[in-house]
Image (tube, rainbow, N blue to C red):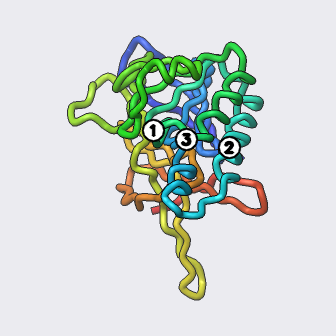
């Protein structure tokens, strides 16, 4: 189940914008027909395997399948990756992504640089990815990997980087940490798209909105977390 939310904009030049939060760890900007995700971390699992840590290859393949399913569902005009697309130097997972990219055809893919972007821009170009720089300002929104120290007062921010998570407690002292979307009055932090990612527990304020991602037997849904 997805969640369609309205984002209040500070600029009088734009009307209220609509964002669809997907339990598949991405979002869709309806007015621009743009699919947005962060922290794909291509190459991370292979990087760990090279270091002798047995991480299954299937983890990244499942990420690509999930991304392809989201593209087929939303039919976006463009895809924006808000940082940390690649985790390491080129390896087998980069080749898989290149094949997946070819299957997408003419859909534009843009990248806002994150702290793990170590490749030269030419490497991204060969994968059909246009590197923007540290941020993208589009309409009433700014997309960046991290929240800058000085905010544009007329812009609402979408970021990644922290891999937000929320801790849920159940009966019998059971606890689980789930990926989530964390929205404040100025910013939306996206969950890491890569399933092979740690999580930083968010501490939401009273006016914030938090949507946890619940997964069960191959299906996923969003749950609003009261606080």
Q: Residues within 10 Å of mark 1 (few under 14, many from 20)?
A: many
Q: Secondary structure at mark 3?
A: loop
Pick whichever of labels 1 and 2 is earlier in the sequence. Answer: 2
Q: Is residue 117 above or below residue 138?
A: below
Q: Give the number of the disc on residue 2.
A: 2
Q: Which percent across, then down, holds residue 132?
A: 41, 19
Measuring from the top left, give residue 203's x and y in whole percent. Answer: 37, 60
Query: Is residue 80 shown above or below 162?
Result: above
Residue 124 image point, x, y percent: 50, 23
Q: Is residue 169 left or right of residue 114?
A: right
Say what secondary structure mark 1 lies in: loop
Residue that label 3 marks: 42
Furthest-left residue in view?
A: 150
Q: CA distance from mark 1 to mark 2?
A: 24 Å
Residue 84 - label: 1
Q: Quadrant of the C terminus?
A: bottom left
* Image quadrant assignment for residue 8: top left
Q: Secondary structure at mark 2?
A: loop
Dividing the picture into quarters, in which one does residue 22 lie?
top right
Q: Is residue 31 visible in the rendered structure shown here?
A: no
Closer to the chain start, of discs 3 and 1, is: 3
Does 201 sit left or right of 195 as displayed? left
Is the residue 138 above or below the residue 196 in the image? above
Looking at the image, is mark 1 or mark 2 nearer the viewer? Answer: 1
Q: Are marks 3 and 2 in contact (CB under 8 Å)?
A: no
Give the number of the mark in front: 3 or 1. 3
Evaluate whether residue 191 shows in this view.
Answer: yes
Distance between mark 3 and mark 2 Cα atoms: 25 Å
């Amino acid at each position: 189940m997805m969640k369609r939310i309205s984002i209040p904009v500070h600029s009088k030049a734009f009307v209220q914008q609509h964002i669809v939060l997907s339990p598949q760890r991405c979002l869709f900007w309806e007015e621009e027909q743009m699919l947005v995700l962060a922290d794909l971390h291509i190459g991370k699992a292979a990087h760990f395997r090279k270091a002798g840590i047995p991480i299954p290859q299937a983890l990244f393949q499942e990420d690509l399948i999930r991304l392809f399913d989201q593209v087929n569902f939303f039919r976006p005009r463009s895809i924006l990756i808000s940082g940390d697309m690649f985790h390491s130097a080129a390896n087998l997972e980069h080749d898989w992504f290149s094949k997946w990219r070819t299957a997408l055809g003419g859909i534009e893919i843009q990248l806002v640089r994150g702290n793990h972007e170590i490749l030269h821009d030419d490497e991204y170009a060969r994968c059909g990815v246009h590197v923007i720089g540290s941020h993208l300002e589009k309409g009433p929104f700014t997309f960046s990997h991290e929240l800058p120290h000085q905010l544009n007062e007329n812009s609402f921010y979408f970021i990644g980087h922290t891999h937000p998570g929320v801790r849920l407690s159940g009966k019998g002292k059971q606890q689980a940490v789930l990926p989530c979307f964390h929205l404040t009055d100025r910013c939306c932090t996206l969950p890491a798209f890569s399933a092979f990612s740690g999580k930083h527990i968010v501490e939401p304020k009273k006016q914030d909105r938090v949507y946890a991602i619940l997964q069960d037997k191959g299906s996923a849904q969003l749950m609003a977390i009261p606080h």
